[in-house]
Amino acid sequence: MNLKGDIKLKQNLKNMKKHYLKIFLIIILCRGLIYAQSFNASVSNTTVGLSDQFQISFTFSAQSINGVSNFAPPNFNNFMILSGPNESTSMQIINSSVSGSKTYSYYLQPKAMGRYTIASASINYDGKILKSNPLTITVVKGSPKQKTQAQGNGTVSDKEIGENLFIRAVSDQDKVYMGQQVTVTYELYTRLGIASQMSVSKLPSYEGFWSEEINVPNNITFKTEVYNGKQYRVGILKKVALFPTQQGVLSVTPMELNIPVQIQRRSQSGNIFDNFFNDPFFNNTQAVNYDAKSNTLHIRVIPLPNQNVPKSFNGAVGNYTINSQLDKTDTKTNQPVDLKINISGTGNIQLLNLPEVKLPTGLEQYEPKTSDQVNRTGLINGSKTIDYLIVPRVTGKKEIPPVKFSFFNPAKHEYVTVSTQPYEINVAQGPASDQSLAGYSKEDIKILDQDIRYIKTSPGDISRIGSIGIFGFGFWSSIILPFAAFVGLISWKRKNDKLAGNLQLLRYQRAEKIARTRFKTAKSLMESNNQEGFYSEISLALFGYLEDKLHISKADISLEKAEEELNKKSVNESLLVNLKNCIEKCEYARFAPSGNLSTEMNEMYNDMTNVIIELEKSLTPKKYS
């Protein structure tokens, strides 16, 4: 009986071993299935507004992520890349088994309304190519309502985030004279961690101001500051110098940013293990997209005093000095002299009007050439150089009186007049020359002065070779061609006179040429990998084109004003959207610098070129018909 019991016990033990072996094999197999590698795409919102930003993520998960390489994103043709790719990794430990994931994320903004498919991304894992699932994004005109951000079992409201993160717009003064600089600084105050690159939702507008961007570092440097009894980390986002062009109370609209904020997960379960998993060793935070908005600024602009206004005052506000230089004081008739005047100091250098040069009889002045040098590191300062070409027509001693330049100094609350020294020119008789030199440059005049051919006093070798045919081809050519040339010359002269009398028409016709010149400069900056200079030059090219083409003054130019004028001319709405995207992308560049600068700048160059070509076709249809 005992023997049978022992045999039965051994048999049961053997069966149990087989049973446990099967369970062990099943567990091993399940672990292999659980931790099989995967590569998936996800998006924060499948329906977004035209001016909204959204996040797209490509996540690879496996038991080990060491073999991941060669991530290839899809083509984002219909979207602007505001930030990315931003890489992040995470690890998980479940029942002593380790697994990991690697995420590549982008922040995007749509270029136009519609329904778009974002194709698959690909990645290499241990020699095997994995592809993510495609995604469909619907872009609508408005902005869909955002849902409350969920955090674990609790929720985090915008109010809670806003108490610990906000944008503060500060002006160095709230009452200024018209034309006086007021500096506005946009600062980010935060007590929270920022997960990745922030993106601009809306830039401020400066209606009633001429604006100059002040250079600040691309990478935000934070300092510690106590505000309203709380300690924050504070960093400068943007700095701009504003010059009021009209009086009254002017408003600076808010700046809006989309900021991915790291929030600590909160638990409401009361589980005893919650305190353990709140240990900083574990990744117990989650990124929440928060829309931060600065305050609106109000600047009171008062008019300049109307008493003791100098006759030479022409609207300049700031603090300036003036000096001059004449290349020679002894010359001959019809030989030009060069008078350079340099105005330097603090203020709106680019909007300074040229001082009047009063010349005595016998001296002729041609259209001056100007050049500006502007320093944008704090108070806007620099210099304007004016090059006057003066041609003496009569012999004798000629005096050029001092050139006066007046400005209003807001620090002293008074008008100031500065002047150059007088010059005396001794004009001797020079060789006879054509008195009509209008339209020629200084270099042209020098060439004409050296290129006179004298009339021969003897006939030289002349021999009769035959009679001239009166009705031959040469005869009629000599009659018709001079007449045609004369008619063409009259037409050209009338056109030039018309342009000279109509500065708006002149600017309109030269707009494309000036933009093309600036684009050449931008291309050279792009080839030298000068990101800041490239975006500045290409932005100036577009705004300069819009100023000249739409007859908008430098002081009044803004994106809103340009859109208003283009709408009056019935420009296609999609072209307006592309124009707005190009301008905003230039501004966004410093907030979300790309990893591949050359590719980003090349795309911007091509997009901006296409916009100006399409605008030229819309505004000048006859040229392309």
Image (cartoon, grey):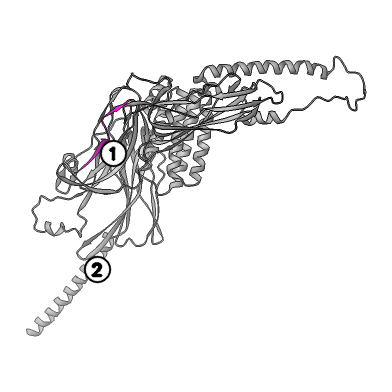
The majority secondary structure of the magenta stretch comes to strand
Q: Quadrant of residue 496?
A: top right
The x and y percentages for residue 134 are: 36, 45
Q: Which residue is mark 2?
A: 25
Task: Verify whether residue 173 appears in magenta.
Answer: yes
What's under tag 2, amino acid-wise? Answer: Leu
Q: Residue at x 37, y 43 (%)?
A: 590
Q: Residue furthest left?
A: 1
Provide residue 347's location: percent of width, then percent of height: 38, 32
In front: label 2 or label 1: 1
Instruction: Give the spatial CA distance, label 2 vs label 1.
Output: 62 Å
Local crowd at mark 1 within 10 Å, few (<14), some, or many (≥20)? many
Looking at this view, name the residue that lies furthest to the bottom: 3
The residue lying toward the viewer, choosing from 445 and 330, is: 330
Q: Is residue 477 left or right of residue 536?
A: right
Q: Quadrant of residue 202?
A: top left
Q: Position of residue 55 (x, y in %)?
A: 31, 44
Marking on residue 186: 1
Q: Position of residue 460 (x, y in %)?
A: 89, 27
Residue 353 visible, this angle: no
**Visible in this render: residue 430?**
yes
On screen, 489 above or below 63? above
Give the residue displayed 24% in from the left and 68% down from the top.
25
User: Measuring 43% from the left and 33% from the top, which residue is drawn there?
Assistant: 321
Q: Amino acid at mark 1?
A: Tyr
Q: Earlier in the sequence, mark 2 or mark 1?
A: 2
Secondary structure, mark 2, is helix
- Depth order, front residue of 471/334: 334
* Secondary structure at numbered mark 1: strand
> Which segment is the magenta one?
165-177
Image marks 2 and 1: residues in contact by CB distance under 8 Å? no
Q: For the C terminus, which image quadrant?
A: top right
